[in-house]
Image: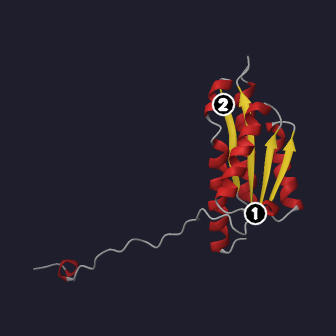
Amino acid sequence: MKSRSASRRKVPASPPRGLEGELDASGLRFTLLCSRWNPTITDRLLASALEALRRHGARETDLRVVKVPGAFELPGAARMAMAADRSDALIALGAIIRGETNHHEILGHAVASALANLSAETGRPIGFGLLTCDTIEQARERIGKGADAAEAAIEMANLSRRRGTR
C-alpha cells in the first residue's frame, strides 16, 4: 500500500524568490565619513570609495564628504549625518594600526559595534571601511576596502529602496 505522499505527483521545487541590491548608484545620495588619523591610508581609502561610487553612476552632487579626527569619532559623525541629511547610505572610512598596546583592538571593536548598531537601529545602510591592521604595509594592501565599503553601501541602499524601507 502506497502512502498518500508517495502517490502524489512530484512538483519540481522552484527556487525561493530572491531579493538583492544592485550596483547602480544612479540617483542615490551618499555621505562619506573619513577619519583624518593615518591620512596616508585614509585619503586613499576615500579616493577608492569615491572612484567606485562614480564608476557605478553616482553624481558629484549626490556625494558629501565629512572628515573627522579619528576612527572613534566615526559613529558620532554617522549619527549626526543621519540627523542632518537624507543620504540613502553612509560610508565610514578609517584606519587603526596596531601600536604598543591593545588599544587598537578595543577601538576597532567599539567602532564596528557602534556603526553596526546604528545601522540596525535606523535602517540606514552604512558601508564599513574601517581597516584594523598590524602594520602600515598591511593597511596599504587593503586600500581597496574603500571601494568594497562603497559597493556594499550601494547594494544596501538599493535593497532598502526595493523593500520600501527608505
Q: Of 9 and 163, which appears nearest the observer?
A: 163
Q: Of 63 and 31, which appears nearest the observer?
A: 63
What is the C-alpha distance between the residues marked 2 and 1? Answer: 28 Å
- Mark 1 is on which residue type? Arg
Left or right of residue 13, residue 147 in this image = right
Q: Quadrant of the C terminus?
A: bottom right
Residue lying at 86% horizontally and 42% vertically, measured from the top left: 68
Please state the horizontal and vertical placement of residue 150, each as a whole percent of the image.
67, 52
Q: Which residue is mark 2?
A: 139
**Position above or below: 9 against 62:** below
Q: Quadrant of residue 5?
A: bottom left
Label 2 crowd bin: few (<14), some (14–19), many (20+), radius 10 Å: many
Residue lying at 73% horizontally and 16% vertically, measured from the top left: 100
Q: Quadrant of the N terminus?
A: bottom left
Determine the secondary structure under disc 2: helix
Q: Which residue is mark 1?
A: 59
Please state the horizontal and vertical placement of residue 14, each as a whole percent of the image.
36, 74
Q: Quadrant of residue 113?
A: top right
Please state the horizontal and vertical placement of residue 129, each as a whole percent of the image.
69, 44
Determine the secondary structure under disc 1: loop
- Mark 2 is on which residue type? Ala
**How many marks do you count on the picture?**
2
**Position above or below: 95 against 115:** above
Which numbered disc, 2 or 1, marks the residue that appears first in the sequence?
1
